[in-house]
Amino acid sequence: MPKFFSSIFFKLMLIILLAGLGINVAIILFFGAFRHHVAKTYYPHLNRYIDYLINDIGDPPNQTRARRIAEQTEMVIAYDGADQGWTTASGPIDFPMDRMRIRHRDSRMEAASYHGTYRVSVQLAKGRLTFFLSHRQAAENKLKALSLGLLSLITLLMVAAYFGIRWVLKPLRGLKKGVDQVSRGDLSHRIPLKRNDELKDLSDAFNTMTARLQHLVNAKEQLLLDVSHELRTPVTRIKVALAMLPASPDRESIMEDIKEIEEKITELLETARSLNIAASPAYGEADLSALIRSTVRQFESGRPAIRMEALPETLRLQIDAEQISRALKNVVDNAQKYSPDDADPIQISVETDAAMVSIIIKDHGIGIPDEDCDFIFEPFYRADKARTPRRDGYGLGLSLTRNIVEAHGGDINISSTLERGTTVCIHLPLTPP
């Protein structure tokens, strides 16, 4: 709910409500000023009308004439004099006398009202003549109907404004989805262009940006593959040339260097190819616990040691076992690579809930700077090369790992503290997508 209150949608609705409130206040003030202005000319006319009634009723007033006027105008007329008092009402006068507000008063006349009921008192020679007037029931019903209609109209307008704002801001939801997709590495995502306004221009600019980014990344990957392929030919020629030279310590040293270069080129090519292959997992039933044990076994000779905790005896899932094993290898390899040999053991544990299984790899190594955590899964990105104790690798391992995990319908996240260690969580769904 707090997120809703900080949204653009809520702010626009608040602006509309405040604008509506301001308009209503302005109208009320206008009609108040108008009413005050009209009152200046209304009460002289009221005095003249009262004079007509008094001339007709007489002074002292005649009760018979007063009753006839009361029947014609649906008023109640009452007289309170020194020698007599009467009223045209058939019973007690039922008016809210104590709640009436004085609207006008002078030496001769007093006018008061309360919610559609009016009282006008006129001082005569020997008494006071009072006129009471109330809205007819039909008029009150009509007023209530109009009020209900006005309330319904305002509600309808607010509902229409709600859906109108949602329609206007709909492209923003598409933009947010696009940003989420791009942040996950899906540079092929495009936002549909169905409008012809500023938000359409913004969506178009976003699509252009992601297209250029995709082109740059693809060009970088293609360059990597092309250069790796091209390097194979000169390396092969050097090997042939060295094979024809007489045996010597220098020849053997150069052969070792050439062999290392070949291994690096092969690793680079295989890793780059895997970035594309990982998007299509070959699902099959596998025991995740056994897969973790067999993967970790390959690192038992390395330092620091690896300790498995809370690992189920068996945990069968529909996964691509080869790809998941490769993803685990990348994470565990990084955990050993960026931890001192005398660091505490790397901890590997598994947690499950109703929908997901989580593989948690925690090391006690050098950690990752906060400014690098947001980019650590990007291809070719390596955090703070100056601090890296072992500089082999191309920054493709974690990118490949994320591709594999997301292709399985899961996600991967990382948290790290400098000089204290890093925790990587791989979340896989129990049911494949």
Image (cartoon, helix red, strand yellow):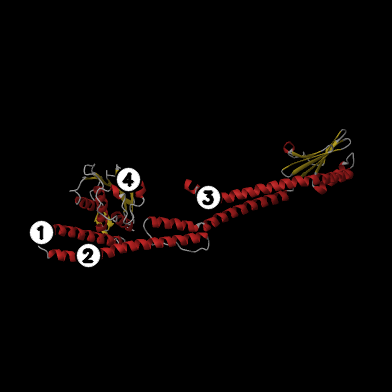
Q: Residues within 10 Å of mark 1 (few under 14, many from 20)?
A: few
Query: Which residue in the protein does label 3 denote?
Result: 10
Q: Secondary structure at mark 3?
A: helix
Q: Secondary structure at mark 4?
A: strand
The amino acid sitting under disc 4 is: Ser
- Asked if 422 appears above or below 261 in the picture, the reply is above
Q: CA distance from mark 4 to mark 2?
A: 38 Å
* Element assignment for label 1: loop
Which quadrant: the C terminus? bottom left
Identify residue type, mark 3. Answer: Phe
> Number of numbered discs present?
4
Other residues around mark 4 within 10 Å, as few (<14) / some (14–19) / many (≥20): many
Q: Which residue is mark 2?
A: 232
Instruction: Give whichever of discs 2 and 1 has the lower sequence position.
Output: 2
**Of labels 1 and 3, the one closer to you:** 1
- Which of label 4 and label 2 is nearer to you? 2
Label 2: state its secondary structure: helix
Note whether residue 367 is visible: yes
* Mark-to-mark CA distance, 2 and 1: 24 Å
For the residues carrying marks 2 and 1, which lies nearer the camera in this image? 1
Query: Position of 29 compared to 170: left or right?
Result: right
Q: Which amino acid, mark 1? A: Ser
Q: Which residue is mark 4?
A: 416
- Residue 281: image location, x then y, percent: 29, 60
Front residue of 203/163: it is 203
The first of marks 4 and 1 along the sequence is 1
Give residue 98's position: percent from left, percent from top: 73, 36
Q: Are marks 2 and 3 in contact (CB under 8 Å)?
A: no
Compared to residue 374, the image places residue 199 above or below, namely below
Mark linked to residue 248: 1
